[in-house]
Image (spheres, rainbow, N blue to C red):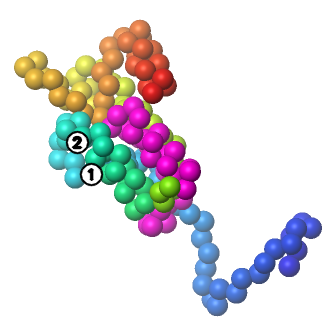
Amino acid sequence: TEIDGIACAAVDLHGRAVIPGMVEGHAHTGFEDIAAMTDPGDTPPEEGVLIGLLNAGRLLEAGFTSAFSAAGVRPRQDPVTRNWINAGRAPGPRLLAASPEITATGNLGDGSVMHQHRDSFGLVADGADEVRAAVRRCLRE
């Protein structure tokens, strides 16, 4: 068979249908069993990367061929997952990697309280200068 002058193989699917892969538009590959927003920050970085790779594989197995990360747990976690997928070292969808959520004090992603600092999935940055610095740190990593 030829399509636009290009030789193609025809495949008889015996009455089955072919659908394109699905896109996960709000993925958190590094999150697992989250009960509180500080849970991701309590996960050691090494485990976080493994969780990300495992969940990326699960997404692909479920039919998602692309995923947009809504927030990574740490600056390097999503890029490492993406890089391993792209290098063929781990199964997963095409992944648009993200940094942690950049948030203001008291907003979603700020897990700290006055008496106790807690990491979560957010980098706290108040004001334009701090936001620019947080973005630059994430890009550097």
Disc 2 vs disc 1: Cβ atoms closer than 8 Å? yes
Residue 86 position, x and y percent, is 56, 50
Left or right of residue 67, residue 46 in this image: left
**Mark linked to residue 32:** 1
Asked if 54 appears above or below 98 in the picture, the reply is below
Q: What residue is shown at x 33% (from left), y 37% (from top)?
A: 73
Q: What residue is shown at x 26% (from left), y 51% (from top)?
A: 32
Q: Amino acid at mark 1?
A: Glu
Q: Amino acid at mark 2?
A: Thr
From mark 2 to mark 1, how far is it between C-alphas?
9 Å
Residue 103 position, x and y percent, is 33, 24
**Mark linked to residue 43:** 2
Answer with mark 2 or mark 1, whichever residue precedes in sequence. 1
Please state the extent of the stretch shown in magenta in the rendering.
Answer: 59-88
Residue 58 position, x and y percent, is 40, 62
Q: What residue is shown at x 88% (from left), y 68% (from top)?
A: 6
